[in-house]
Image (cartoon, rainbow, N blue to C red):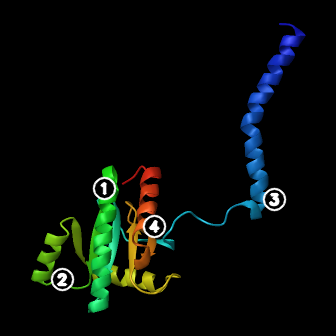
Amino acid sequence: MTDKDLTQSRRKLLLVAATAFVPMMIAYGLFFFAPDMIPKTTTNRGELVQPSIDISDRLATEGRWQLLMPMTEPCLTACAEILQGVLHQTRQINIALGKNADRLGRGLVRATPFPPAEGEAMKVDYPNLKLIVDAALLNELTAVSSMSQAAAGYHVFLVDPMGQLILAYPAAKVDKPLLLDLKHLMKVSNIG
C-alpha cells in the first residue's frame, strides 16, 4: 500500500468516525452549555399528570390503553348531559382508531353499584364500555381532576397498559385532541 492510499484510507476512517461522534458532541454541548435551546414543551394535547399515578392494583388494564370516565353522584342534569356527550365521543374515538381500536378500553367509574335498569341501559347503549365500581379509584380521579391546571369540571383520564394514570382531558378536549394523542401513543408504543 502506498503512502497516498494509506492517507486516503485514514481520511475515510476519520470521516466515518466523525459522522458518529460529531452529532454526539454537539448534543452534549447543547445539553450542558446551552440548555435554553432545548424545547421545554411537550406535544401532548391533554394535561400530563405529574408524577404519573400507579392504579394497576385497582384497575385491570388487560394490557390495553384505558380511557376512564368518572361518574360522581348525584349526577344532575348538566353532569348527565356532559357524561352522555363524553361517552359518545369516546366511542367515536375508539371507532376512529381503526385497526388499533382493540388496543383501547373504556371504563365508567362509579363509587356505588349501578342500579340494574341503568346498568342494563348502559350495556345496551355502549356494549364495549366497562362499568367499574370502585370508590377509591373514583376518589383518586376526582382528586387529580381538582388539582388540574386546566378548567375545573369534568375530566377523562388516559391510563397506559402498565396501569399508570398519565393524561387528563377536560370535557372540551375529548374529541380531536384526545384522538391525536391516542394515535401518536399507539404509533410509538409497542405495548398495549
The amino acid type found where label 1 is placed reads Ala
Q: Position of residue 52 (x, y in %)?
A: 48, 70
Q: Which of marks 1 and 2 is nearer the N terminus?
A: 1
At horizontal 78% and vertical 29% (from top left) the residue drawn is: 15
Location of mark 4 (residue): 177
The amino acid type found where label 2 is placed reads Pro
> Given contact means CB atoms under 8 Å apart, are the residues at marks 1 and 3 in contact?
no
Q: Earlier in the sequence, mark 2 or mark 3?
A: 3
The amino acid type found where label 4 is placed reads Pro
**Real-space Cα separation, disc 2 to disc 3, in angstroms:** 57 Å
**Real-space Cα separation, disc 4 to disc 1, in angstroms:** 17 Å
Q: Nearer the viewer, mark 4 or mark 1?
A: 4
Q: Which mark is residue 113?
A: 2
**Real-space Cα separation, disc 4 to disc 2, in angstroms:** 31 Å
Location of mark 1 (residue): 101
**Above-or-below relation of 142 to 160:** below
Q: Earlier in the sequence, mark 4 or mark 1?
A: 1
**Real-space Cα separation, disc 1 to disc 3, in angstroms:** 44 Å
